Image (tube, helix red, strand yellow):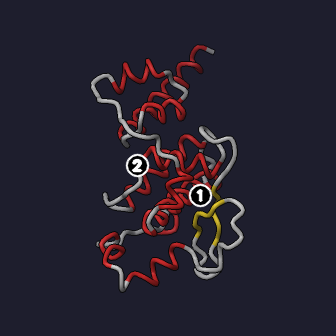
Amino acid sequence: MAYEHAERHIQALQLAKSCVEHGARMKTVAYLTGLSASLLREYFYNDRAATGGRWPSSQDWYHMATLVQRAEASLIASIFQFLRTEHACSARKAMVCAYKMYRERWSGRSSISFDRAFELIASVEGIWTQHSAQLALHTCARCRCRYLIALGDTSADHSGCVFCKLVKRYATDSRIQSSFAGNPDLRLTSEKN
């Protein structure tokens, strides 16, 4: 029994380390790992200044985000769901792995912080900081990409998904072109092989 407790504690510390490496706030790490703030401060945040500012709320942010940011958010949620369903990852592990995969595919040009991604997944799944789901993944009838919509949105297919819009505007929008300089590979690992 003591061994199992020690193993869970070590896994929580490893998860916390991964979160901190991705720039997570202490509050986010505490939600994901269940470790106390005092323990996290002692091991990971003792020599760091606390991240200030408003806690990133995905519901406020997502609906006002740029097209590129909404595409990035959809990518994170899609990877998370893929890891949960196809690889039976726990929500905690899937969150960290999905964010890492997103950052790798966006080649350092990512605009979504770990904390915002955490809140985004919480809003999709109705876990951690959320009591119920607020966002959902929807499959586009045109291109078959999965993208985020407000839960219960009945107008989702009328104007095309964020990816259809990106493709349509790419040739004329320099901001979108600069976001995709170098053509990031957005396919999931298993789809490459």
Of the residues shown, which amino acid type is indicated by label 2?
Ser
Given the current orientation, which residue lies at the most extreme left position?
A: 47
- Residue 124 is situated, as x and y percent measured from the top left of the image, at 62, 52
Secondary structure under tag 1 reads helix
Residue that numbered label 1 is attached to = 82
* Residue 164: image tag: none
Could you tell me how far apart the alpha carbons at marks 1 and 2 are, in whole angstroms? 20 Å
Question: Which residue is drawn at the image coordinates 33% and 76% (left, top)?
Answer: 177
How busy is the neighbourhood of tag 1: few (under 14 within 10 Å), some, or many (20 plus)?
A: some
- Of residues 156 and 137, the one nearer the viewer is 156
Give the mark nearer the N terminus: 1 vs 2: 1
The secondary structure type at the circle numbered 2 is loop
- Dot 2, how many residues are within 10 Å of its Cα: few (below 14), some (14-19), or many (20+)? some
**Residue 78 image position (x, y, % from top left):** 56, 60
Q: Which residue is at 34% across, 26% downward?
A: 45
Q: Position of residue 66 (x, y in %)?
A: 44, 66
Q: Which mark is residue 113?
A: 2
